[in-house]
Amino acid sequence: MSDDAIIRNLRRIEGQVKGIQRMVGEQRPCDDILTQIMAIKAALDRVTKDLVESNMSRCFETYPPDELKEKMARTINILCKM
């Protein structure tokens, strides 16, 4: 996925978050708000996957082999915390 597509998806997520803010302000039912929060979480998971898949080589190509293993381990550790 291209960076432009990832940015479009992030902007869509931003709109969803603003929608939740409105929903809270309007005191909409909790179930409706939670449903939207779950949709945002799923969308963020997709963006994370797309970012890692499309940019992994670019993110790591500048590291020498001895640093690459450490950098990849840190990245995997971050992903595992999600």
Image: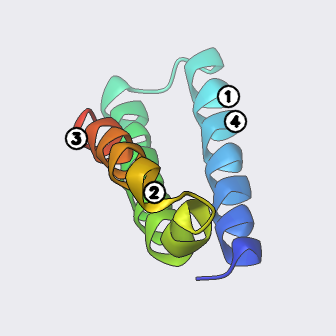
Q: Which mark is residue 18?
A: 4
Q: Earlier in the sequence, mark 4 or mark 2?
A: 4
Q: Secondary structure at mark 2?
A: helix
Is 2 positioned to the left or the right of 32 in the image? right
Q: Secondary structure at mark 3?
A: helix
Mark 2 neighbour density, 10 Å: few (under 14) some (14–19) many (20 or more): some
Name the amino acid type tagged 3: Cys
**Compared to 10, does 36 lie above or below?**
above
Is 30 positioned to the left or the right of 48 in the image? left
State which mark lies toward you, 2 or 1.
2
Q: Earlier in the sequence, mark 1 or mark 3?
A: 1
Name the amino acid type tagged 1: Arg
**Labels 1 and 4 touching (C-beta < 8 A):** yes
Q: Secondary structure at mark 1?
A: helix
Coordinates of residue 27 in the picture (x, y in percent): 53, 17
Coordinates of residue 15 in the picture (x, y in percent): 71, 48
Q: Which residue is mark 2?
A: 48
Residue 21 or residue 28, whichever sits in front: 21
Q: Secondary structure at mark 4?
A: helix
Coordinates of residue 79 in the picture (x, y in percent): 31, 44
**CA gap, disc 3 and disc 2:** 12 Å
Residue 28 or residue 35, whichever sits in front: 35
Q: Which mark is residue 22?
A: 1
Q: Which residue is mark 3?
A: 80
**Labels 3 and 2 touching (C-beta < 8 A):** no
Mark 4 neighbour density, 10 Å: few (under 14) some (14–19) many (20 or more): few
